[in-house]
């Protein structure tokens, strides 16, 4: 069953045509890795899915529902921000720079949205929040402020915060790019276990090894278009285009069996 | 040149002794400052012109305490008005709506650009410009109206003059605070499904307050003293009460000391309040974590 449906999405920033007709269907439970060099439009595509960026043309639906737009006689009318907020409730997003709320403890970060947005009782939100902290291996950090946590710990709290809304889809925007190399593993481990539990995930990443091990399909973007899509074994081992070949040769990644 | 290798140990048992830096001038400065302080204190007690008896007689007198109450009340009302209006102006200034941002800019331009004293007198004389104030149809008749002179008492003129002027300054302070909150914070809030209002109220504003608070206390302390300008409207604030008394007893020095004492008491209370408030709102804030100096290079010894 299709969860995310992207149909000929276009996006411009001024003269810069960032997305040039991107179409992609993501099935329920699927893990997608979006790869491509910087400026290829992968982060913009991810941000369009939960309407952190608006579209200029085309359509994106999640579970059959347009995010940020209302169907109006063949055109899509942009909704006011407070209505978009309702659309976003079940789409989690994790950012490159974590963006934890610095004036709140780890647990307060996690329970804020369930309490304010979903109206969950405080006790219940905190119980589930502690369960999530335990799941990302930070049960003892509930009362710690973000400034006292390492980058890897902050990102794991950020993942728990997104999970607290019980999302049906998780978006990751280069979740390990801002981390010291020795902290990347702990975040990828959490993501790997999420994928194993059947969470639908779209991950913008430079971690090709992670992408090849965890994702069901790899999407390679170049100059605002999807150039190659397929299982990691096909896409990474036998790139069909020069663009992907040169991208792979520049990254230090080597697929086993590929010379 | 010695060969590169293991540094030769001079003595394994006794580490080198260290003598902290000495500041010979420190004691000279202490003596000079102590001497000046002694001189000042001696002067305070022996100079008859201070007239400490008069000071003591009036410090807790009724007109002075009434004036103090007016000063405190005026400061509180003007600052509340300034903070509420200043927040609105700051948000409008940052709005993508040109009419709102233009209005906020114009407001700051007018109220920061003309003297506070002029504004006070202007509001006091509003009746000369608009004899009647009321609510009605734009460009049409007034439905409810009242005599301007009945509405604009010295107190309301003072509140408007000081509050509207201060709002222009507060809006810039608040705008600076709001802009200091990283863009990612709003995005994270939106990404979690918070509405724009929830995101402002719960995420952006509490962080902006950390930046806004020190400057706001600066403004409150300034306002406490600025209220003395209202003596031009014959409004009985603390300084006006003191002036009234020394115009009769011809002893300005002790009366000004009485007023200054109360101003100092108020500002001291404010500074203590600021200390505890900042301690509370700065939870979770830490100075940038110090990075370990792992790449510190040691110079080769030749």
Image (cartoon, grey):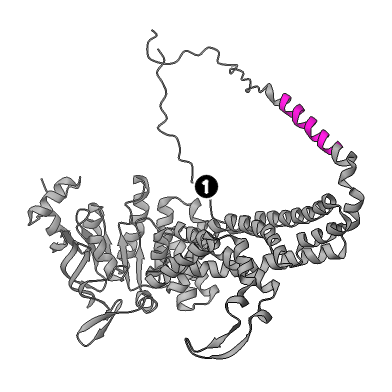
Which residues make up the magenta segment? B28-42
Is A16 magenta? The answer is no
Identify which residue is drawn at 29% across, 68% down.
A53
Query: Whole-percent x and y of residue A214?
Result: 25, 60
Residue A128 visible here: yes
The chain letter for the residue carrying disc 1 is B
Q: Nearer the viewer, residue A173 or A163?
A: A173
Q: Is residue B296 above or below residue A43?
A: above
Identify which residue is drawn at 41% across, 21% down.
B299
Q: Residues within 10 Å of mark 1 (few under 14, many from 20)?
A: few
Residue B203 visible here: no
Query: Whole-percent x and y of residue B87?
Result: 52, 67
Magenta segment's dominant SS is: helix
Q: Point out the residue furthest to the top here.
A: B1
Q: Point out the residue furthest to the front here.
A: B128
Query: Whole-percent x and y of residue A27?
Result: 22, 73
Name the image quarter holding residue A189.
bottom left
Name the image quarter holding residue B102.
bottom left
Identify which residue is drawn at 36% across, 68% down.
A92
- Label 1: state its secondary structure: loop
Location of the N terminus of chain A by quadrant is bottom left
Q: Nearer the viewer, residue A199 or B291?
A: B291
Q: Which residue is mark 1?
A: B287
Identify which residue is drawn at 42% across, 30% down.
B296
Horizontal side of A237 relative to B78 (left or right) equals: left
Q: Nearer the viewer, residue A27 or B120?
A: B120
Location of the C terminus of chain A by quadrant is top left
């Amino acid at each position: 069953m299709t969860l995310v449906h992207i149909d000929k999405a276009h996006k411009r920033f001024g003269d810069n045509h960032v997305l040039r007709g991107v179409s992609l269907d993501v099935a329920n439970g699927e893990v997608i890795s979006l790869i491509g060099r910087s400026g290829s439009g992968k982060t913009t595509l991810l941000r369009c899915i939960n309407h952190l960026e608006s579209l200029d043309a085309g359509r994106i639906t999640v579970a059959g529902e347009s995010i940020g737009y209302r169907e109006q006689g063949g055109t899509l009318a942009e909704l006011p921000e407070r209505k978009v907020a309702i659309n976003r409730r079940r789409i989690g997003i994790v950012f490159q720079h974590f963006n934890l709320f610095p004036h709140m403890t780890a647990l307060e970060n996690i329970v804020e949205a369930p309490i304010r947005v979903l109206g969950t009782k405080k006790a219940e939100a905190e119980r589930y929040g502690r369960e999530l902290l335990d799941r990302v291996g930070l049960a003892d950090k509930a009362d710690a402020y973000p400034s006292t946590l390492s980058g890897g710990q902050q990102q794991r709290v950020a993942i728990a915060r997104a999970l607290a809304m019980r999302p049906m889809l998780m978006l990751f925007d280069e979740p390990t790019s801002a981390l010291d190399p020795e902290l990347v593993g702990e975040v990828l481990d959490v993501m790997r276990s999420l994928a194993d539990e059947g969470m639908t995930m779209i991950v913008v990443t430079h971690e090709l090894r992670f992408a090849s091990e965890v994702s069901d399909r790899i999407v390679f973007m170049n100059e605002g278009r999807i150039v190659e899509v397929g299982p990691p074994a096909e896409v990474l081992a036998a790139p069909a285009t020069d663009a992907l070949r040169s991208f792979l040769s520049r990254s230090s990644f080597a697929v086993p069996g590929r010379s | 040149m010695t060969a590169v290798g293991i540094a030769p140990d001079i003595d394994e048992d006794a580490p080198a002794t260290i003598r902290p830096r000495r500041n010979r001038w420190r004691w000279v400065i202490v003596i000079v400052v102590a001497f000046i302080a002694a001189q000042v204190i001696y002067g305070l007690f022996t100079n008859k012109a201070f007239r400490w008896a008069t000071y003591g007689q009036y410090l807790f007198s009724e007109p002075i305490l009434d004036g103090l109450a007016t000063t405190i009340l005026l400061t509180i009302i003007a600052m509340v008005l300034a903070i509420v209006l200043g927040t609105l102006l700051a948000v409008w200034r940052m709005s993508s709506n040109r009419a709102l941002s233009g209005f906020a800019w114009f407001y700051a331009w007018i109220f920061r650009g003309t003297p506070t004293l002029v504004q006070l007198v202007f509001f006091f004389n509003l009746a000369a410009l608009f004899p009647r104030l009321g609510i009605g149809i734009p460009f049409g008749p007034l439905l409810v109206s009242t005599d301007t002179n009945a509405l604009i008492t010295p107190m309301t003129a003072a509140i408007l003059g000081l509050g509207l002027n201060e709002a222009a300054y507060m809006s810039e302070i608040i705008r600076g605070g709001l802009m200091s909150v990283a863009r990612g914070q709003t995005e994270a809030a939106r990404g979690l499904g918070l509405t724009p209002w929830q995101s402002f109220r719960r995420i952006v504003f509490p962080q902006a307050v950390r930046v806004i608070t020190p400057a706001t206390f600066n403004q409150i302390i300034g306002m406490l003293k600025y209220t003395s300008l209202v003596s031009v409207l014959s409004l009985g604030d603390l300084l006006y009460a003191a002036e009234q008394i020394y115009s009769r007893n011809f002893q300005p020095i002790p009366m000004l000391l009485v007023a200054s004492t109360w101003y100092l008491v108020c500002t001291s209370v404010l500074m203590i309040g600021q200390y505890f408030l900042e301690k509370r709102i700065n939870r979770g804030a830490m100075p940038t974590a110090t990075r370990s100096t792992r790449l510190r290079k040691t110079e080769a010894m030749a």
